[in-house]
């Protein structure tokens, strides 16, 4: 069994937090861990993949995960939420909407139509490159980086380097799940990590 950490619980702050009408509002009290499936030897032998699709398939669990992220960042100065494709998009876009800011996609090479910054990096099972539009953010903008999982930190570190190229500030790094035993958090110092 791997060591993992999910976003801490909080009480919902109104009927829209769970998508229920005011008379039906109640806290989601099931542990989110039960909605994360372990898949051994995927995508290659020796990797224990954390499958979030059961959480995404349950609207109350998915909403509870998003609510916890929103509660943590609400009231902070954030100008944009950015995420690497593809699973990061799932949490970053609705989080950006809830915070009333824009969403910036960070993509693989050749997927963005305008001028881009690129960063090459190593991840848990190979090498990759990420790109972001050069005009996505700039000096003085505060950018929150979001992903579903913090493992070794390679993908998010690449996102941080892309944001830093634009001279924007990092508002923090947000994850649904953290595999603390892999030490990815260390690569993100000095930035705040919420998981």
Image (tube, helix red, strand yellow):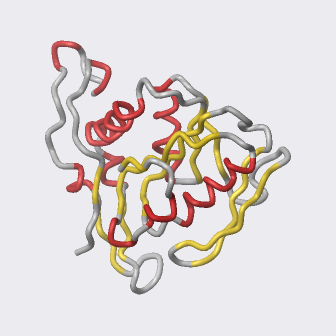
Q: Position of residue 43 (x, y in %)?
A: 47, 76
Q: Is residue 166 above or below residue 120?
A: above
Q: Residue furthest top?
A: 22
Q: Say left or right for 160 vs 18.
A: right
Q: Residue furthest front?
A: 190
Q: Say left or right for 80 vs 35.
A: right
Q: Position of residue 177 (x, y in %)?
A: 35, 56
* Image mark count: 0
Of the 4 image quadrants, the one containing the N terminus is: bottom left
Residue at image coords 74%, 53%: 111
Q: Is residue 184 above or below residue 165?
A: below
Q: Is residue 133 above or below residue 41?
A: above
Q: Residue furthest bottom?
A: 45
Q: Residue furthest right?
A: 115
Residue at image coords 26%, 22%: 13
Q: Nearer the viewer, residue 76 or 29?
A: 76
Q: Position of residue 50 (x, y in %)?
A: 36, 65
Residue at image coords 48%, 26%: 99
Residue at image coords 20%, 30%: 11
Q: Nearer the viewer, residue 128 or 51?
A: 128
Q: Position of residue 161 (x, y in %)?
A: 66, 56
Splitting the image into 4 quarters, where does residue 61 fall? Answer: top left
Q: Say left or right for 184 vs 63.
A: right
């Amino acid at each position: 069994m791997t060591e993992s950490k999910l976003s801490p619980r909080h009480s919902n702050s109104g009927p829209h937090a769970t998508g229920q009408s005011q008379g039906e509002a109640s806290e989601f009290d099931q542990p989110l861990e039960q909605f994360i499936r372990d898949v051994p030897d995927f995508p290659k032998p020796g990797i224990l993949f954390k499958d979030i699709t059961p959480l995404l398939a349950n609207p109350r669990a998915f909403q509870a995960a998003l609510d916890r992220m929103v509660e943590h960042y609400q009231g902070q100065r954030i100008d944009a939420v950015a995420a690497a494709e593809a699973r990061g998009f799932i949490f970053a876009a609705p989080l950006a909407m809830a915070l009333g800011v824009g969403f910036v996609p960070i993509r693989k090479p050749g997927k963005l139509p305008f001028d881009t910054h690129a960063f090459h990096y190593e991840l848990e099972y190979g090498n990759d490159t990420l790109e972001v539009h050069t005009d996505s953010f700039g000096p003085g903008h505060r950018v929150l980086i979001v992903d579903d999982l913090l493992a070794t930190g390679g993908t998010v570190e690449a996102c941080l380097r892309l944001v830093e190229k634009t001279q924007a500030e990092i508002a923090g790094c947000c994850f649904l799940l953290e595999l603390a035993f892999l030490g990815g958090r260390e690569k993100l110092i000095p930035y705040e990590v919420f998981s």
